[in-house]
Amino acid sequence: MTMTSIPVTLSPTGRAWMFGDDVNTDVLAPGAYMKFGIAEIAKHCLESVAPDFARMAQPGDVVFAGRNFGAGSSREQAAEVLRHLGIACVVAVSFSGIYYRNGFNLGLPLLVCPQATSVAAGAQVACDLDGARIHDFGSGRTLQCEPVPAHLVALVRDGGLVPHLQKRLDAARRDAGSKATPLAFSGNAP
Amino acid sequence: MSAPQTLAQKLVARAAGRTQVMPGDIVTCQVDLAMMHDSGGPRRVQPLLAQLGAQVWNPDKVVVVTDHYVPAYDDSSRAIVQIARDWVRQAGVTRFHDGEGICHVIVPQKGYLRPGMFAVGGDSHSPTGGAFGAYMFGVGATEMLGVLVTGEIWLKVPHTIRMVWNGRLTSGVSAKDMMLFLCRSFGMDGGQYQAIEYAGSAVQALPMQERMTLSNMTAELGAQAGLVAPDQVTADWLAAAGVSDVDLASWHTDAGAPLLAEHNFDAGALQPQVAEPDSPANGRDVADLGHVALNLAYIGACTGAKLEDLRMAAQVLRGRQVARGVRLLVAPASAQDQARAEQEGVLGALVDAGAELLPNSCGACAGYGAHVFGDDVVAISTTARNFKGRMGSAASQVYLASPWTVAASAVAGRVADPREFLA
């Protein structure tokens, strides 16, 4: 892991929204709206715990939460809604495993940070995925997060799994006839 | 002589084409079985496959089950189910089960799973397959798309947490109580997205569908997979499902294999558990909640309406009546389980007690369908999750318990200890 030496020269991308432990997929993407498209589900995102969130969230805002964010169902709309609302990143003490995979697959960056709940609601913040850190302009602190595995950084940089697959398929099609290119995601695996 | 390995390591190593893997390694695994349902399956992956111009890597390794939006109840749900029907034909998927029951129960029932397999499911309760000594876990629809295109998936090799249940469960105490107790003890992230292995004499004594309940609720413990080493019980059950060539010898944890933790429990001391709203981790001993009055009892879902679950409920309900002011809803987990329950007189006992039968689908457990809960509902349910608003109104209250306890509570009109009815 190379240390990034880039200082925090970022400008804040948005405000901090604060949530507790076990924010589950049923409150992120309520079952009653699952038959609709993402725009409709997004209107009801988190409404049972934060009625203003879907209406007030702005592109660039960051969601902070406690343990086990995204617990529950595998419904990836629970990650897709936050990207749809323009949330730049979710920072949590921990994530449920399926949600963690879904976030990167849907192009939503996730950072694991033991101090995720120490930011003040509404504070101006910026995320640095490469450096795995968050800058809190309210307190002037930089929160160090756990490094993100390289293949997931690559995935989210591509915009998620669909554009990533598109890239691989295009490459495979270009190579077709010369030498078959296996369509694995293991580019970064040992 | 290679180093001792856990069951999870062996299953992942085989799928990754390696002789050995170590916890924490990131590997690429070949998928033996990819299971999807109507909600997270074709309606989500079909447009993406079209966008990519990609084909399914191997239609014979794909299973599609409609269980969330069946029976369809409006135009949107009809359209969703129709997409599934059209897509399987177009993609060449022949393992398609339409309205026959819930995917996690259908997959083993049809003989699609066997020990040693590596499988993914487009649903969080996919760890259910671990009861058969297969590595099975849940993924979202986009990740499923990746599997459908490539036949592969990346995995961080899990550590193993062993939950050893010694002794024997007593009458009126079930696998559901074991899982509510584990959720209560370790929390919904206690599994740390690693593999849990259920072991010990009390687990070995469980019939297959009770083992499925353990693996199923591994999702509520936050582990990736919930494994039970296969044994003669597994082989016999699979033989009845038409699977004959079952390897029992390879798929177990070696003595001295590296474990993240091993926890020991006395099954004989376990009390019936009831989880208060709004989390499966809010478990209490049943005796602490006898004051809670109820107006609905729900027996449903892959977690709590398999044949074994219906048998438990019938043991309590036979010759009794549901209390006035309480509705008892029963949604058997599959058509096959319902038919067997009918042959055994189990279904009759439920209906005679006042149960209303619902279709063989996920229904209110997933917050779908015509029977979601209204504002005034105070329910006790055999399902896996009681998150706020999951089963309907955010004002409804849902308690979770075993089929025995739900049936006893339906009769009492309040949370009740089933052992008072089984004596």
Image: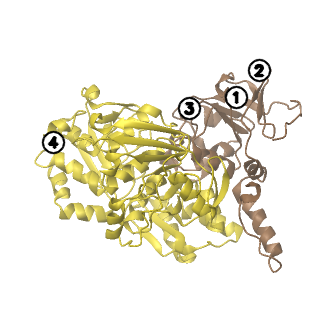
Chain colours: A brown, B yellow
Marks counted in the figure total 4
Q: Position of residue B289 (x, y in %)?
A: 28, 28
Marks 1/4 in contact by CB < 8 Å: the verdict is no
Question: Is any atom of residue B355 visible in this view?
Answer: no
Alpha carbons under labels 3 and 1: distance apart: 16 Å
Q: Do labels 4 and 3 share a chain?
A: no
Mark 4 or 3, closer to the camera: 4
* Residue labelled with disc 1: A16
What amino acid type is highlighted by mark number 2? Gly
CA neighbours of label 2 inside 10 A, class few (<14), some (14 to 19), many (20+): some
* Residue labelled with disc 2: A138
Marks 2/1 in contact by CB < 8 Å: the verdict is yes
Above or below: residue A57 compared with residue B217? above
What amino acid type is highlighted by mark number 3? Pro
What numbered label is drawn on residue A51?
A: 3
* Residue labelled with disc 4: B422
